[in-house]
Image: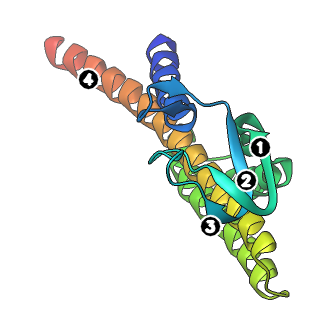
Amino acid sequence: MFRALRFRFGIMFFLIFLAFFFDFMNGEFKWDHQTGICHEVDYQASTPSVTKCISGQNITTISKFEILIDLPTLMFVWGITFLGSYFKSGSLINKLERASHLSKDAGELAATVGAVLTFAGVFHEAAMASAFRYIFYAFFVGHLTAIILITFANYLRSKEEDNTQINNSTATSSI
């Protein structure tokens, strides 16, 4: 029953995986990412997809897997999505569609909270670099959750439409 859905989700996550980890300019996978505030760039060693920093502040190399997991943001976005869209009664398809819209809003709210907390404080580049990571991660989680929910809703709606067509053809042939 869910084979087509699993295949579609598998392809979606594979495309996201490629976008996140594969360097299309060099044709290789990049598993780590340089972070910090760069003051001087080595333009000879840099490529359009990878910047080589010579000197800067808090320059570290982290795994890209680290970037993908931020539990407070996940709990914030998924918690608001669940609390705002789950009710016992009603159509599952309609609940999933509403939840997909709400998850985008929850991601935007999480990003806005992060922005307000960051930009209301003392200005310094290190905090802003860190804040932008979490702000855009909140958008990413909200939109990815929305895509998953709406894909599942579309799958259920197509199954519902198939059942309606079968029932309508059976009813007209019996007349």
Question: Which residue, given by chain and number where applicable, does mark 4 sit on?
Answer: 165
Amino acid type of disc 1? Thr
Identify the image quadrant of residue 59: bottom right
Identify the image quadrant of residue 135: bottom right
Identify the image quadrant of residue 8: top left
Q: CA distance from mark 1 to mark 4?
A: 56 Å
| Image-based side of 105 in relation to 35, left or right | left
Q: CA distance from mark 1 to mark 3?
A: 28 Å
Q: CA distance from mark 4 to mark 2?
A: 55 Å
Q: CA distance from mark 2 to mark 1?
A: 6 Å
Amino acid type of disc 3? Glu
Dot 1 surroundings within 10 Å: few (below 14), some, or many (20 or more)?
few
Question: Residue sitting at 47 percent across and 45 percent down?
Answer: 47
Q: CA distance from mark 2 to mark 3?
A: 24 Å
Q: CA distance from mark 4 to mark 3?
A: 39 Å
Earlier-in-chain disc, 2 versus 1 = 2
